[in-house]
Image (cartoon, rainbow, N blue to C red):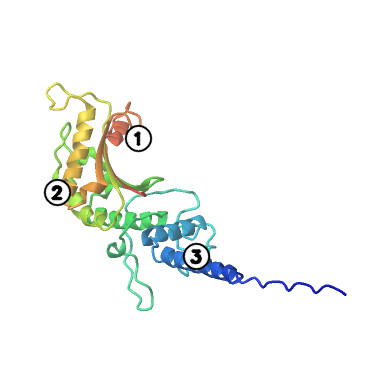
Amino acid sequence: MQRKKKAKKENSERWLLTYSDLITLLMIFFILLYTMSNVNQQKFEQLAESLGVAFGTGNSVLDGSNGVIPMDAGHINGQDPSGSASQKPTSAPTKAPDATSKPENTASNIKGTISTEKGMRDLQNRINKILNDLKIEDYVNTEVGSIGLITTFSNDVFFDSGDDSLKPEMIAGLQKLAPLLNQVDNSIVVEGNTDNVQMSNNSKFKSNWQLSSARAANVVQYLVEQGKVNGNRISAIGYGEYRPKASNKTDKGRAQNRRIDIIILYN
């Protein structure tokens, strides 16, 4: 006679596999919920703008904009194909408003941290308008460079020779610029520069280092105390004669080297 086969015992712990899978999925689900609830909005916007610049649109590719290929391949972010970035203040012709057109970018809507070239150029246009209104555009130059927006004031107009006191023309310009500077969150550096002519014996400054540093510091002090610019985001640097823009061998070159640069940095 054949022996009866022993009945196999049913595995009563198989439910643990399903249970453990369920718990793991629930944990992952709640981790995802927590992650999505803690998105850094500022970093997200910076990422969106950076992607827009990388694709050559100047706009965010994450906000539903019209694609990544610019309509005019010869002009990217409003830049001329020649690559020129500097812009002297020019008077723009007046244009009658169109009820169907979108409002132009104004000083009131330039705010937050500017991280794109297009944003810097918009800010540059606002500054150029202020300089035109004050009629000092011949003595001030604006330029969008790799580090940010550089506004250069000629020392010969805004400071007396060998002195660090702000002249009325310089104060008028800073008064108008301060509200615009307060609308953006970018860091600001004020740089003082001189030519290589040595200080006179009766000067209160022993060197061009001291003169350039004092002028830059006085500009910063005015912007902070009178213009209400946050002191945490602005600094002063004096370079003396050691960062010339032109040759110090000519009067014209020395005049270009005597300057104050107010730089709004990208970051």
As helix, strand or loop, the secondary structure at mark 3 comes to: helix
Relative depth, front residue between 51 and 21 = 21
The label on residue 28 is 3
Q: Is residue 162 left or right of residue 16?
A: left
Q: x and y percent of residue 54 in the render?
A: 50, 55
Q: CA distance from mark 2 to mark 3?
A: 52 Å
Assess disc 2: are there few (<14), some (14-19) or many (≥20) residues with their C-alpha within 10 Å of its C-alpha: few
Please indicate, yes or no, whether residue 201 appears anywhere in the rendered image: yes
As helix, strand or loop, the secondary structure at mark 1 comes to: loop
Q: x and y percent of residue 100 in the render?
A: 38, 78
Q: x and y percent of residue 70 in the render?
A: 52, 62
Q: First in sequence, mark 1 or 2: give its number.
A: 2
> Residue at (27%, 50%) from the top-left corner?
137
- Is residue 222 depicted above or below 94 in this figure? above
Please indicate, yes or no, whether residue 152 appears anywhere in the rendered image: no
The amino acid type of the residue labelled 2 equals Glu
The label on residue 225 is 2
- Is residue 167 depicted above or below 176 in this figure? above
Q: Check disc 1 and report the residue beneath it.
A: 245
> Residue at (20%, 41%) from the top-left corner?
157
Q: CA distance from mark 1 to mark 3?
A: 58 Å
